[in-house]
Image (tube, helix red, strand yellow):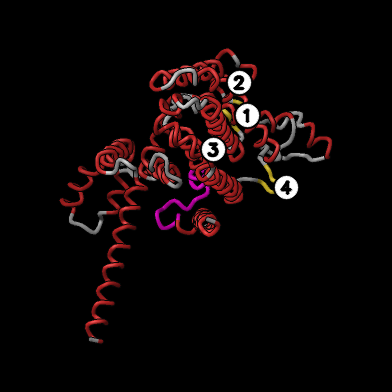
Amino acid sequence: MKSIVLSTKKRDYTTLLVFAVIVFTAPLWGKIIGAGYPDLLQKFAIFGLFAIGYNILFGLTGYLSFGHAAFLGVGSYVTVWSFKLLTMNAIPAVLLAIVFSGVFALLIGFLSLRRSGIYFSILTLAFAQMSYNLAYSVLTPITNGETGLRVLTSDPRVVDTALGYTIEGSPLATLFGTTLTGYPGFYFCAVVLVLGFWLSLKIFRSPFGMKLVAIKTNQTRMEYTGFNHRPYLLCAFVISGMYAGLAGGLLAVVDPLAGAERMQWTASGEVVLMTILGGVGTLFGPIIGAATIKYFENIFSGIGDTALAEIFSFLPDAVSNLLITIISPFVGSGWHLTLGILFMLIIIFLPGGMSQGFQKIADKIKQKNKKSSTSEVKLEKDGIA
């Protein structure tokens, strides 16, 4: 038993190490696919974290929430208010974003989890839209309405003022003197992403995570055995909401702005697509899905007819024009069409998401290597005989 536990821990640490290496080397391999610039890498990390947290609720318990954008927005607003009132240091802002989004998730989860299935989904959607409308109009003194909440030079920032820190120009988030823009901003988000992945890994392997999976597998049977599943569901909902609030806080760290649009239902739907596209209930799937969608959104949307003409410039004009006519509806402003086709193909042929596809490829490689090693051993035996 002890050896099994040690081997599991070793495998988990290896997984964490591999993941950390992939994340921290993103500026290098990102250049190969045209995604090596810091703004896009920041989005990969932030929305990957958002999807990891959502997967703890949806992937483990099976409860589909359409309201997680509310926590994303709360995290952004709290972070900007921390910058305005306290300090431009990112650490207090991020911690406050986690706390406030957790409290807000506790309130919404306590009410929404009284129902299950589609009724739970509709309740979370209703709360998210209520939050969006409140932020857009009713709570304008706090959120600044449609204009959005910005950090201004004239803000009090009592902690910075007491410590004698002065800001010249546009206020930007810092980490003990280092401005969190560009690659420093990405690496700050990358460290938080790795920590968030590590916590998710611990939850997946823990008895708590196994209880969440049991709720997803057969909640009725658990109820018949006298098991009270609601505290576990509420805890998963709060943890997931805190992840979303943390992601919202990081959005405000790399760009000190908070707007009501982050609470719209489309943002909630986006994280659902990320999780399903990558693989529901898997460790790496949501991160893969988030990176894929953000890549399409930022790279494919920038490919126009001019870029296509440069790509096919080596071909005869007639062939080049034909290819541009065929491909142009799927890139540029039509990138949603390409993403929709990809999503449809994944759902049809890989219900487990892109991670299932990678797993199948890995299994085939293992089988091929196993067959080749077996045949080599057989040949050696025949030769000896």
Determine the CA span between mark 3 and mark 1: 40 Å
Residue underneath mark 3: 208
Above or below for 45 versus 244: below
Determine the CA span between mark 1 and mark 4: 21 Å
Counting residues from the N terminus, which is met first, the one under dot 1 or under dot 4? Answer: 1
Above or below for 288 versus 369: above
Nearest the eye: 246 or 203: 203
**Where residue 2 sits: x, y (%)?**
55, 57
- In the image as oriented, which residue stretches furthest toward the bottom? 384
- Residue 364 lies left or right of residue 89; in this view the side is left
Instruction: Please tell me the numbered disc located at residue 144.
Output: 2
Which quarter of the figure is the C terminus placed in?
bottom left
Instruction: For the residues labelled 1 and 4, say whether their Cβ atoms are less than 8 Å apart.
Output: no
Badge 1 crowding class, 10 Å Cα cut-off, few under 14, some 14 to 19, many 20 or more, is: many
Residue underneath mark 4: 177
Nearest the eye: 292 or 95: 95
Residue type at the position of mark 4: Gly
At a point 30% along the width and 36% down the height, the residue shown is: 340
Above or below for 25 versus 242: below
